[in-house]
Each structure stands twice: as structure tokens, then as C-alpha cells.
């Protein structure tokens, strides 16, 4: 193949708990569960003579050399001996700086797409190592799992054998846009906690992920209190979305999106109509219950 296309899906954190702080580096250990959304960027990768180029439609992502998809492509090209180059064409549909993992998902898509052009010369376990070096969330997207429990910095995964059932979802973003940097969110959390608080028991078995009601009982997102405290409009958005009576509602990662899951499309669409788009931007989507598709000829 000389040209492939791959979907780079967004994610939500079903719950997120900060359980430890590493010394002296200061990194945080977390416990979380990821689930894919149907909402996805599209990445088309074409074989070229040499180097890596990037064109983007839909968002300003800054300098190409800092883009995770470019870095992922270069990692595979270096591992395979720079036998060719690639042109990356990225169509952004996932809101940026929203906690939905768009940049990390683009990076994972680039890893798999360039490896497909190299006849899958890089074994899967090595691709996952590349993913971890690019960023903790990249590992989940590179795994292809529709849902997984994660530990450490988010790079240690256990695939959920029976993922939560696919369900209609609504992603809400504040208007005007609001960006929350993850390092800031951790710093705000640190300011509120001299040490991580003791945690109660949590059973992460098949029953815990069997339905959205049980998922809602797994706990919240530890970023919600510090982030909502710094950004009251985001707290108000969460409360408006919770007021539409979804099965489940959470801050996405460290923000600034909030996501909710509903019993059926009618309830999801009724919630969107009730909220309107004067105070928020809304994206209608759904959760995924099947593994993400890999690269396909374009």
C-alpha cells in the first residue's frame, strides 16, 4: 500500500483517581478507565520519498515538529531505516485541549498507519513502547481496545474483555472556548492535597463495566473539584448537563469538555435541544463497544 486512511477516535475517562505522587520527579500515579467514542479525527498517510510533512484541516495545532502525529510517524520511519517518507493529512473533528485525547489518538493513528506502509515491520509490542514514549494516553489508543483500565501514568493497561455497551453520548464544551492545561490541573490538585487521600475498596470486574449504571458507581474524576473551582463556568456546564438526567456524566480528563451518556438517542437528542448552543457547544456521538478499525487503503 502507498496510501492508507485511519480513524483516530476520541476517548472519555469513565472514572479517574489520583492515587500517588512520584518523588522526586513529581509525576502522578493514577487509576482510570478509558472508553472510545465514535467521534474521530481522520488521518490519511501517503508514502513519499523522504521526510514527514503535515497538513491540517479544522484546527490550528501549532508547529508541525511539536505535533504528536509527526513524532509518531518519525518514530516508525527511524525504526524501519528511513526507507521512505510520509505525507500526513489530518482532518480534526475532536475538539482540541478538551480532555478527549485527540492529539494522543492522532499519534497512535500515525504509528499504525506508517507501520502499515512499512508492511508492519515494527512488532506490536514495540509500537506500544513508542506510544508510551509519546504520551501516556497514546498507549490506550495504540492498543485498539474499545475500553481499558489503566494504572501508573496511564500507560499500564488491562483490556476490558466485555466493554461497556455502546450508548448515545453528548460532549459539551464551554462557549466561549476554555482550555485547561493538564499540568495546571495537577498543580491545582496538589495545592488541595498534601498527600493523596486514603481510598476505599473498588472492585474492577466484569460486573463493574456491564452497564452504565454500575459504571456511574465506580467514582468520579479527581480533577473535577480543582478544575471546577478555578473555572466556575465549567462547573455550571457540568451541572446543566447533569440536569438532563443522563446515565453517566463526567469531566473529560482534566477538561475542558464534559461528556454524558444516555439510555437512547431520543433522550440524548432531547438533552441537546434543551441545552441549546447559546452557552455551550455540543457534539452528538456515541461510545464504542468494538475495537477500533486499523489502517485501510485510501
Image (spheres, rainbow, N blue to C red):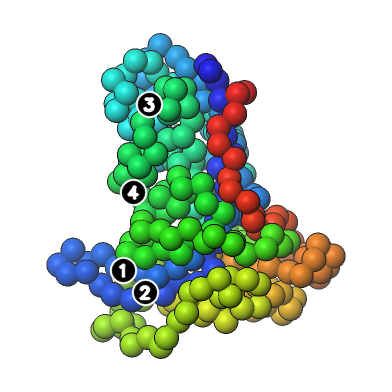
- Could you classify mark 4 by the number of other residues whose Cα lies within 10 Å: few (under 14), some (14-19), or many (20 or more)? many
Q: Residue at x 33, y 86 (%)?
A: 197
Q: Residue at x 45, y 52 (%)?
A: 140
How many angstroms separate mark 3 from mark 4 (CA)? 19 Å
> Nearest the camera: 240 or 52?
52
First in sequence: mark 1 vs mark 4: 1
Which residue is disc 1 drawn over? 29
- Left or right: 231 as drawn, with respect to 245: left
Looking at the image, is mark 3 or mark 2 nearer the viewer? 3
Callout 1–callout 2 Cβ contact below 8 Å:
yes
Which residue is disc 3 drawn over? 121
Callout 3–callout 4 Cβ contact below 8 Å:
no
Quarter assignment of residue 244: bottom right
Which residue is disc 2 drawn over? 18
Looking at the image, is mark 3 or mark 4 nearer the viewer? 3
- Could you classify mark 2 by the number of other residues whose Cα lies within 10 Å: few (under 14), some (14-19), or many (20 or more)? many
Q: From this view, report whether residue 70 is shown above or below residue 242.
A: above
Label 4 sits on a secondary structure element that is helix
View extreme (top): residue: 49
Amino acid at each position: 500500500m502507498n496510501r492508507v486512511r485511519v480513524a483516530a477516535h476520541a476517548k472519555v475517562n469513565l472514572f479517574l483517581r489520583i492515587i500517588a505522587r512520584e518523588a522526586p520527579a513529581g509525576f502522578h500515579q493514577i487509576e482510570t478507565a478509558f472508553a472510545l467514542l465514535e467521534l474521530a479525527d481522520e488521518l490519511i498517510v501517503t508514502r513519499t520519498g523522504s521526510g514527514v510533512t503535515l497538513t491540517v484541516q479544522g484546527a490550528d495545532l501549532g508547529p508541525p515538529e511539536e505535533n504528536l502525529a509527526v513524532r509518531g510517524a518519525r518514530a516508525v520511519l527511524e525504526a524501519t531505516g528511513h526507507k521512505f517518507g510520509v505525507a500526513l493529512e489530518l482532518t480534526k473533528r475532536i475538539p482540541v485541549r478538551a480532555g478527549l485525547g485527540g492529539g494522543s489518538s492522532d499519534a497512535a493513528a500515525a504509528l499504525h498507519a506508517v507501520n502499515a506502509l512499512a508492511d508492519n515491520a515494527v512488532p506490536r509490542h514495540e509500537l506500544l513502547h513508542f506510544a508510551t514514549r509519546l504520551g501516556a494516553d497514546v498507549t490506550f489508543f495504540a492498543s485498539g481496545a474499545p475500553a481499558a483500565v489503566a494504572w501508573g501514568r496511564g500507560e499500564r493497561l488491562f483490556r476490558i474483555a466485555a466493554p461497556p455497551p455502546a450508548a448515545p453520548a453528548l460532549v459539551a464544551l464551554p462557549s466561549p472556548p476554555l482550555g485547561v492545561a493538564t499540568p495546571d490541573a495537577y498543580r491545582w490538585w496538589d495545592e488541595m492535597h498534601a498527600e493523596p487521600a486514603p481510598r476505599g475498596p473498588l472492585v474492577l470486574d466484569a460486573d463493574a463495566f456491564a452497564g452504565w449504571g454500575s459504571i456511574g458507581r465506580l467514582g468520579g474524576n479527581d480533577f473535577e473539584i480543582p478544575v471546577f473551582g478555578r473555572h466556575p463556568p465549567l462547573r455550571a456546564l457540568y451541572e446543566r448537563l447533569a440536569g438532563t438526567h443522563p446515565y453517566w456524566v463526567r469531566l473529560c480528563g482534566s477538561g475542558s469538555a464534559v461528556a454524558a451518556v444516555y439510555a437512547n438517542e431520543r433522550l440524548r437528542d432531547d438533552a441537546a435541544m434543551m441545552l441549546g448552543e447559546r452557552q455551550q457547544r455540543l457534539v452528538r456521538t456515541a461510545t464504542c463497544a468494538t475495537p477500533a478499525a486499523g489502517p485501510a487503503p485510501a
